[in-house]
Image (cartoon, rainbow, N blue to C red):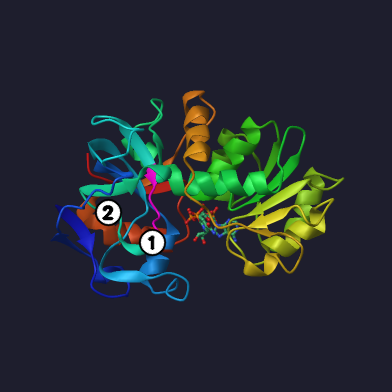
Amino acid sequence: MKAITTDSYGDPDVLALADQPDPKVAPDSVLIRVKAAGVNPVDWKILAGYLDPIMHVHFPLIPGWDVAGVVEAVGMDATEYRVGDEVMGYVRKDEVQHGTFAELVAAPVRTLARKPAALDWRQAAGVPLAGLTAYQALKRIGVGGGDTVLVHAAAGGVGAFAVQIAVAWGARVIGTAGEHNHDFLRSLGAEPVTYGEGLADRVRALAPDGVDAAADFVGGEAVDVSQQVLKDPKRVASVVDNEVVGKGGHLVWVRPDSADLTALADLADAGKLTVNIDTALPLAQAAEAFRRSQSGRARGKIVLDLS
Ligand SMILES: NC(=O)c1ccc[n+]([C@@H]2O[C@H](COP(=O)([O-])OP(=O)(O)OC[C@H]3O[C@@H](n4cnc5c(N)ncnc54)[C@H](OP(=O)(O)O)[C@@H]3O)[C@@H](O)[C@H]2O)c1
C-alpha cells in the first residue's frame, strides 16, 4: 500500500509518500480501506518529537490518528463489523507507528463507530479526534441545559465541535475567535467574542452574572480568563494547559471511545452537528496539510482525501 512515512522526527518536509507492507489485522481489529484521514495538531507535534517523553514512537512512522473508510477485512473476533461497513475512528494505539495517512489501516474495534450518513467522507474523517475531545471535555465539566459555556478557540477543529455539542445539549455558548470567524461562530450557534486583551470584560458584557463552565482549546491566558468569569472556578477544562489542574480545573486527554463516537454520529444524523472543511488535500500533499495545521488558523478541519 501507499502511505505517508518518515524515518525520523522532523518538520513536515521529512514526510514522503512510499510503499509500505499492508497492515496485519489483529483478532479484535478490522482492516479499513481509507477514504479520508483527518489531520490534527498532534500529528505535527508527534513528528516534531514533542510527545517522545510520554509515548513510544517507532520508525518508519506512518502518522495520523483519524480515519473514515470502508471495512475491507475483519479480525478473527471483530464481530461488531462486516466487510463493506462504513466506519470512522480515532485510531490511537498504545504505541505510535502504523497511522491512518495510508491507503489501508488496521483499527481496533474499540476505536471505531459507524460513519454517520449525514456526513461525507471528508467530514466523517474530521470528527473522531476533535469531536471526541470536545465531547469528553464538555462532559468533564458537566455541561448541560441552561448552562452558559465559554469556548476558547471556538472556530478551530475542536472548538467548532464543542460549540455545536454544547448547543445540542441546551447550553448557551460564548465562543472566542478572530473577527474573521465571528459569522462562522454565529452559524454554529455561538455568540462570538474577540480574544486578546480585555477578553474577560467582553465576556462579562455578554454574561454579567458570569459563565457556568469554560473549555480551553488554545492555552495562553484562556484558563486565567476563564477563572475570572466563572461562577465556580473549578468548572474549567483545558486540553493544552497542564497547569489547569493546579488551578482547580481539569486536564483532558482525549480517549478512543466507541460509545462517545457513536453519540457524535447520532448528533450528526440528527442534523445537530456538521463539519466545516478548512482544507482537503490528496494523500501525497500531507506535508502541506501539516503546515496548514501549524498555522493555527484552520476554520474547522483539515483532511487528506483518498476517495
Ligand atoms: N489534550 C487533547 O486530548 C487534545 C485533543 C485535541 C486537540 N488538542 C490541542 O488543542 C489545540 C486545538 O486543537 P484544534 O484541532 O482545535 O486546533 P486548530 O484547528 O488548529 O485551531 C485553530 C483555531 O484556533 C483559533 N485560535 C488561534 N489562536 C487563538 C486564540 N489565542 N484564542 C482563540 N482562538 C484562537 C483560530 O481561530 P482564529 O483564526 O479566529 O484566531 C483557529 O480557528 C491544539 O493545541 C491541539 O494540539 C489537545
x and y, in percent, of residue 238 in the image: 63, 58
* N-terminal label among 1 and 2: 1
x and y, in percent, of residue 257 in the image: 49, 44
x and y, in percent, of residue 189 in the image: 62, 34
Q: What label sits on residue 101 in the rendered view? A: 2
Q: Nearer the viewer, residue 168 or 128?
A: 128
Q: How many marks?
A: 2
Q: How many residues crowd mark 2 within 10 Å: few (<14), some (14–19), many (20+)?
A: many
Is 194 displayed left or right of 289 in the figure?
A: right
Q: Based on the displayed image, in which of its 4 quarters is residue 293 positioned?
A: bottom left
Residue position marked by numbered label 1 in the rendering: 43
Q: CA distance from mark 1 to mark 2?
A: 10 Å
**For the residue labelled by badge 2, is the local secondary structure a helix, a strand or a loop?**
loop
**For the residue labelled by badge 1, is the local secondary structure a helix, a strand or a loop?**
helix
Residue at 27% across, 57% down: 286
Q: Nearer the viewer, residue 306 or 95?
A: 95
Is 12 displayed left or right of 159 in the figure?
A: left
Is 141 displayed left or right of 88 in the figure?
A: right
Would the CB of label 2 be found within 8 Å of ligand 1? no
173 lies above or below 19: above
Dominant SS of magenta comes to loop
Answer whether labels 1 and 2 touch (C-beta < 8 Å).
yes
x and y, in percent, of residue 149 in the image: 71, 44
Residue 155 seen in the figure: no
What range is drawn magenta here? 89-94
Residue at 76% across, 38% down: 147
Residue at 38% across, 70% down: 56
Q: What label sits on residue 178 in the rendered view? A: none
Residue at 16% across, 52% down: 22
Amino acid under label 2?
Answer: Phe
Amino acid under label 1?
Answer: Asp
83 lies above or below 290: above
